[in-house]
Structures are given as structure tokens and as C-alpha cells.
Image (cartoon, helix red, strand yellow):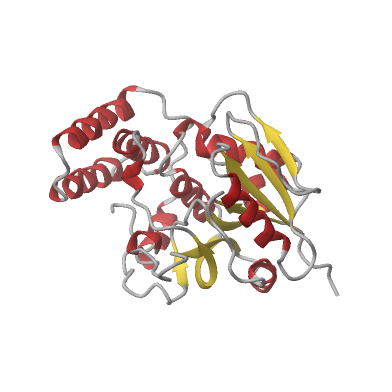
Amino acid sequence: MTAPLKVGAVIITMGNRPDELRALLDSVAKQDGAPVEVVVVGNGAPVPDVPAGVRTVELRENLGIPGGRNVGIEAFGPSGTDVDVLLFLDDDGLLPHTDTAELCRQAFTADPELGIISFRIADPDTGVTQRRHVPRLRASDPMHSSRVTTFLGGANAVRSRVIAEVGALPGEFFYAHEETDLAWRALDGGWMIDYRADMVLHHPTTAPSRHAVYHRMVARNRVWLARRNLPAPLVPVYLGVWMLLTLLRRPSAPALKAWFGGFKEGWTTPCGRRSPMKWRTVWRLTRLGRPPVI
């Protein structure tokens, strides 16, 4: 018999939700099987009191969501390889079931091609999963598990070998689309991604636009995502489709101004290393239901 996969959890915090963080840590500690090792990263803020055995890292400045998570990854050794599986959990989330870590171990053990698992996010009071939290185009049934082409940033599990092989999250993104950047690189490297409805994170229902930087970051990072990862002929198609979708959603004038400012910034600032995916990966994304033009 092989040893069970070793699981570590990365949680970043701004230090402003100590009660929620403590509840999340308690829910991680209650997971079945071998204990889950935990690292809490204070992203430009002190880490609140945490239980004994939880490691902490305090950063002097806010590195953004991907930057903070990358620091947490390295706390588990180079590319996180001191553990087999990395859980990424929002600090105001909570694992309502005690079998989530064990389900992750079973899923990764049973499927050697599986690189990333996206959990189902549900409101703790209503049990409702927002449509935007189902990472596929056909999102009407959040209880249906399937292969997908991206994942949810604050409720997922990543095989550490994926990070070692294709690289960490794009720290320069700061916020928005960093998960899709990693997902596309993982798929291009031969890994698969699953959405699992039975692996649940409770999280209060929110709107992404609550973040002041939302519209600018979404637009800038969408351009960076395309420039970094797509074959050249698909870049204008992908960005043209998303510009049309943005206009059809009729955002407010300030939001649209911020969006176009971010779109321009995406073209005029460095996006990091360009490594366009193979055309067979484009076909794989298409077969999985989301061709990389939308």
C-alpha cells in the first residue's frame, strides 16, 4: 500500500476577519485522515492569533492574491513539494464537511492525470451556489460535477507537481484571472481539472465588483492572460469577444471607464513571459466545452 497523499493548506489574510479565519482553521483541523498542515500568510498585515501548530508568514506589503498564495506555496518547500496536495482557501470561507481533504486524496490517487480540483462554493445560510462560481459555460446545475477548463481561486486543491512543472500563480496579476492563467498552463502541460460538487466551501454570497479595483484589474489581466497564453491568431478574437460581452452587460459609466483604462494598460505594460499554448490544447479546451475565445 502507498502512503496517503500529504495535504497542506494555504490561507492568505489581511488580518481583518479574525473570527472567520479562526472558524476556517477549526474546520480544517476537523478534516478526516492525516492532519492537514496549514500556512497562514499575512498579506501586508499581521496575522491574528491562530491555533498552535499553524505556521504563519507576515509580509511587509500586500503582494495581491496570487503573490500572497505563492509565498504560502513556498512555505511548503520549493513549489510546495513538501506536500502532495495544496488547498487554497479564502479566509472567510469554511469547510462544512469533514471529508473534503480525504476526498481530495482519493481523487488525486485515483486519477494520475488530475492536476486541479475546483470546489463548489455555497452560501452558508441559503446553500445557493452562484452561477459565476461554477467554472464552465453550462452552469445551470451546480450539483453536476465535470471536467472543466478553469477553477475557483479561494476554494480548490492543486497537485504540487503541477506547480513544480508549469510554475506558480502569476504574481504580477495581483487580483483577477490568475486561476485561469495557471489552469491554461496546466492543461497545456497535460493535466486535467475537475469541478466537484461534493467538495464544498461555505462562503457568504458577494459580488466581485465589491473590490474597488475590480473593473480595471479584470480588463488588464484579461489582456495579459491572452498575450501570455494564446496562439497569436486567437488573441484578437478572445479579447474582441470579451469586449463585446462587457458592453452587452451595460456597466455604469465609471465602471466602463475603469474597464477601458485597464484594457489599455494590458496592452501597454509588460505581461510576463509569453508561452502560447499548443493548438492541441486549444482543441482540448474546445472539447471540454470552453474554447479559448470566450
Q: Residue at x 47, y 55 (%)?
A: 152
Q: Residue furthest front?
A: 19
Q: Can residue 147 be seen in this view?
A: yes
Q: Can residue 167 be seen in this view?
A: no
Image: 148 above or below 248: below
Q: Is 63 on the left-hand or right-hand side of 141?
A: right
Q: Nearer the viewer, residue 58 or 26?
A: 26
Q: Is 193 on the left-hand or right-hand side of 210?
A: right
The quarter of the displayed image where residue 6 is located? bottom right
Image: 2 above or below 161: below
Q: Position of residue 215 (x, y in %)?
A: 29, 37
Q: Position of residue 63 (x, y in %)?
A: 54, 30
Q: In which quarter of the image is the N terminus?
A: bottom right
The quarter of the displayed image where residue 190 is located? bottom right
The quarter of the displayed image where residue 266 is located? top left
Q: Is 116 on the left-hand or right-hand side of 33?
A: left
Q: Residue at x 51, y 47 (%)?
A: 182
Q: Residue at x 24, y 35 (%)?
A: 259
Q: Position of residue 159 (x, y in %)?
A: 65, 56
Q: Is 214 on the left-hand or right-hand side of 146?
A: left
Q: Nearer the viewer, residue 95 or 185?
A: 95
Q: How many marks?
A: 0
Q: Which residue is drawn at 39% across and 40% down?
A: 225
Q: Position of residue 165 (x, y in %)?
A: 64, 47
